[in-house]
Image: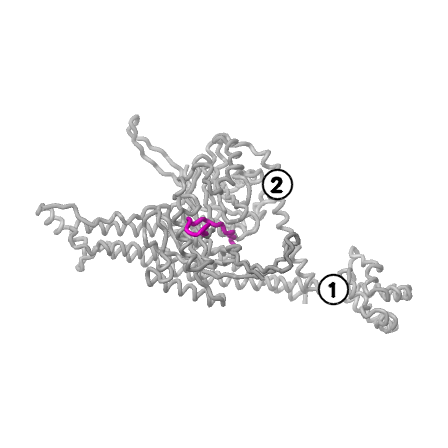
């Protein structure tokens, strides 16, 4: 079995991986075809072999991990359908990009692979594993890749070739003709060869093929312009979405602040009635002391409706002495930091006298929101790194044990200037 | 106050990285090369004097970071396999007018888009089937460029490497400069940290750079053909042969480069359209949510 992937698809996977701070995964789309190879050997006249060739044509990146499976590795078919849509029938495999891990399928990946095989109905589903490592000073980085076909018992790893221009040697041009004095030769090739040339003596094929190339290049440039445009549009809308999210978070925090303020106010009013003297003393000592001494509003209770709070406030104002909302003469005199509305000080302060505005709270809540998924991914990597690997069955062939011990040592060695530990490359091209 | 200028790192934008990889993977039979376009940013920071050393003055360190925003694919002036170099004269004067005007246009484009002056800050080349470390020639070439520009950096991409035993393929990349240990001695490699910086959008300059490759290949082929086409002593059969070589090579370029490039562009366009539609829906939803909050 052989496999190939275009350089552009391969680079694209690397590009998406470079853009993600965590692991990255996606699906491989393409074709599997049978190639017949003929070989003639001394023992047999003709030897026909059928070679299965897996051609990866493009990839469908997943926007995040766990998008079609859960922590236990159970696949959610609905999500899978939504991600793949009509491309489902072209799926021939899937891929995973990981940093600083071994070139081995994790337990969860194996489970997922089995389910995908069944759900997608692809008996020889492949799995492409990318592993990224760097030297300590980050001057050199390596991206290793292995293509597995886990559904086979033997020969699970396949060579992945990247078709390319190969040999475009221009040395194939002949700069001289083979000397020939035969008049017949010259005459015949002159007469019949003329068919190939146009009136200017230029070979017709040259013009024709150049036209094909030109038309193709025009198309490439045209689609390129469309892509440029779509990239810009995508960026603009992404910015707008980000701005909206920020606004919403800000607004939510503002509302939360207002709500708490109302609650605090109410509490203060009920307490003030009974603890007027104590409050004065506390405020005079330290503007923030009150925050520590007053109980924190119980957030487990359902907060009153905003409309209710407003009504209550108004009632309170009309009922009570308006002086309740003005700084007490003693308080103001003793501490210029006494806030006019006690609840505000509590909310805006961080409990230690430092000030904070609601914008900061917005960003920190966003941070927490962003951290949560990443933390989960880190746990995922931890699992992959430790206990799961102990449970993995070793690959049957190919001296797997020595391989992996070599990998553990060999990989850093491969990055050292002394040369590759595995002798797979030609010696230094010096 | 003594000032030390240090090249601390190279930041390679991921879309520029994409173009480098595309280029490096385009052929396994020869080394390809290109120029890195970007800017150098400097940050000065005061370093507290060491108590142990008994210093009382603050030292000011300047750290330089080379930001690479895009690359330009270059033609190989010398097609021999182990010679990848353009002389500093070539670099500043450019071997062909097309190259210099192209790099100027690029720098201009980038400058307009980012509002900052961009220039050539380094070079990259590929090592197909070869270890990623620069050869003696590479180190010397890099040293030459540094004479022109101290901050010039070199990148090498090693590809088409496979460990036959584990069927593991490998692509490596490294960043380096050259230094002369003592006057008159051989140049040595200095490792420079390099980080690929995420860039979710593929920039216009990078896209245009990527689609230059088929043009450059065709141009090279035309030049090669033109050189032998003018030879008048060739008989018709030889001429037909040469014409066929040209046709064959152009066909290789189309199937190996233009075709896959076009396919990738179309896929990217589809992906973007998909993403735009998703984002538009999200925008609608968020706008509604915001309105409800107000």
Residue at mark 2: chain: A
Left or right, B82 with respect to A241, comes to left
Instruction: From the image, tell me which residue sits under label 2.
Output: A383
Residue segment shown in magenta: B178-196
Number of numbered markers: 2
Q: Position of residue A174 (x, y in %)?
A: 22, 48
SS for tag 2? helix
| Image height of B33 relative to A270, above or below | above
Mark 2 nearby-residue class (10 Å; few <14, some 14–19, many ≥20) = some
Instruction: From the image, tell me which residue sits under label 1.
Output: A355
Q: Position of residue B274 (x, y in %)?
A: 50, 57
SS for tag 1? loop
Name the residue rendered at 52%, 34% in the picture: A404
Name the residue rendered at 52%, 43% in the picture: A131
Mark 1 nearby-residue class (10 Å; few <14, some 14–19, many ≥20) = few
| Image height of A204 relative to A50, above or below | below
Colouring of the image: one colour
């Amino acid at each position: 079995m052989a496999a190939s992937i275009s350089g552009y698809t391969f680079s694209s996977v690397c590009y998406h991986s470079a853009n993600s701070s965590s692991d990255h995964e996606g699906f491989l789309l393409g074709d599997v075809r049978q190639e017949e190879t003929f070989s003639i050997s001394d023992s047999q006249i003709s030897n026909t072999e059928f070679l299965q060739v897996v051609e990866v044509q493009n990839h469908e990146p997943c926007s995040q991990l766990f998008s079609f499976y859960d922590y236990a590795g159970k696949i959610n078919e609905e999500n899978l359908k939504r991600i793949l849509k009509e491309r489902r029938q072209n799926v021939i495999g899937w891929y995973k990009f990981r940093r600083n891990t071994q070139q081995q399928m994790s337990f969860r990946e194996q489970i997922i692979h089995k389910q995908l095989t069944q759900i997608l109905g692809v008996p020889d589903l492949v799995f492409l594993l990318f592993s990224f490592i760097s030297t300590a000073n980050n001057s050199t980085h390596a991206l290793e890749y292995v293509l597995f076909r886990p559904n086979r018992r033997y020969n699970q790893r396949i060579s992945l070739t990247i078709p390319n221009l190969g040999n475009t040697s221009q040395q194939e041009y002949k700069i001289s003709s083979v000397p020939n004095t035969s008049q017949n030769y010259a005459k015949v090739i002159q007469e019949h060869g003329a068919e190939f040339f146009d009136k200017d003596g230029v070979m017709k094929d040259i013009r024709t093929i150049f036209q094909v190339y030109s038309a193709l290049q025009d198309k490439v440039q045209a689609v390129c312009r469309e892509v440029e445009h779509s990239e810009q549009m995508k960026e603009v809308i992404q910015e707008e979405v980000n701005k909206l999210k920020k606004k919403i978070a800000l607004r939510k925090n503002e509302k939360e602040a207002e709500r708490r303020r109302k609650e605090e106010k109410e509490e203060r009013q009920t307490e003030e009635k009974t603890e007027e003297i104590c409050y004065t003393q506390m405020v005079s000592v330290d503007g923030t002391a009150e925050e520590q001494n007053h109980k924190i509003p119980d957030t487990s209770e359902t907060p009153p409706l905003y409309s209710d709070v407003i009504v209550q406030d108004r009632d309170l104002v009309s009922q009570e002495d308006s002086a309740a909302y003005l700084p007490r003469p003693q308080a103001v005199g003793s501490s210029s930091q006494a806030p006019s509305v006690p609840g505000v000080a509590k909310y805006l302060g961080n409990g230690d006298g430092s000030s904070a505005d609601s914008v900061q709270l917005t960003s920190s809540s966003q941070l927490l929101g962003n951290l949560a998924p990443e933390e989960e991914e880190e746990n995922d990597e931890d699992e992959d790194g430790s206990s799961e690997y102990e449970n993995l069955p070793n690959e049957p062939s190919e001296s797997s044990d020595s391989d992996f011990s070599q990998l553990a040592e060999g990989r850093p060695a491969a990055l050292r200037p002394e040369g590759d530990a595995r002798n797979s490359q030609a010696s230094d091209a010096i | 106050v003594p000032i030390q200028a240090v090249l601390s790192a190279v930041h390679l934008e991921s879309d520029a990285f994409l173009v480098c990889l595309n280029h490096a993977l385009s052929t396994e039979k020869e080394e390809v090369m290109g120029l890195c376009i970007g800017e150098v940013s400097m940050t000065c920071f005061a370093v507290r004097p060491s108590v142990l050393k008994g210093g009382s003055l603050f030292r000011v360190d300047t750290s330089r970071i080379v930001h690479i925003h895009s690359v330009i694919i270059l033609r190989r002036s010398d097609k021999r396999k182990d010679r990848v170099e353009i002389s500093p004269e070539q670099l500043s004067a450019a071997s062909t007018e097309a190259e210099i005007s192209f790099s100027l246009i690029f720098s201009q484009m980038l400058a307009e888009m980012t509002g900052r002056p961009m220039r050539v800050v380094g070079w990259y080349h590929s090592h197909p089937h070869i270890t990623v470390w620069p050869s003696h020639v590479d180190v010397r070439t890099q040293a030459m460029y540094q004479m022109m520009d101290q901050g010039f950096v070199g990148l090498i991409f090693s590809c088409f490497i496979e460990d036959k035993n584990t069927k593991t393929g490998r692509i490596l990349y490294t960043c380096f400069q050259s230094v002369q240990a003592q006057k008159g001695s051989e140049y040595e490699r200095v490792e420079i940290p390099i980080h690929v910086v995420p860039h979710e959008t593929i920039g216009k300059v990078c896209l245009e750079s990527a689609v230059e490759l088929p043009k450059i290949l065709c141009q090279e082929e035309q030049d090669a053909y033109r050189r032998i086409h003018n030879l008048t002593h060739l008989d018709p059969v030889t001429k037909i042969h040469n014409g066929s070589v040209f046709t064959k090579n152009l066909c290789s370029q189309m199937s190996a480069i233009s075709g896959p490039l076009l396919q990738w562009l179309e896929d990217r366009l589809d992906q973007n359209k998909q993403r735009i539609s998703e984002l538009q829906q999200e925008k609608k939803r968020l706008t509604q949510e915001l309105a409800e909050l107000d």
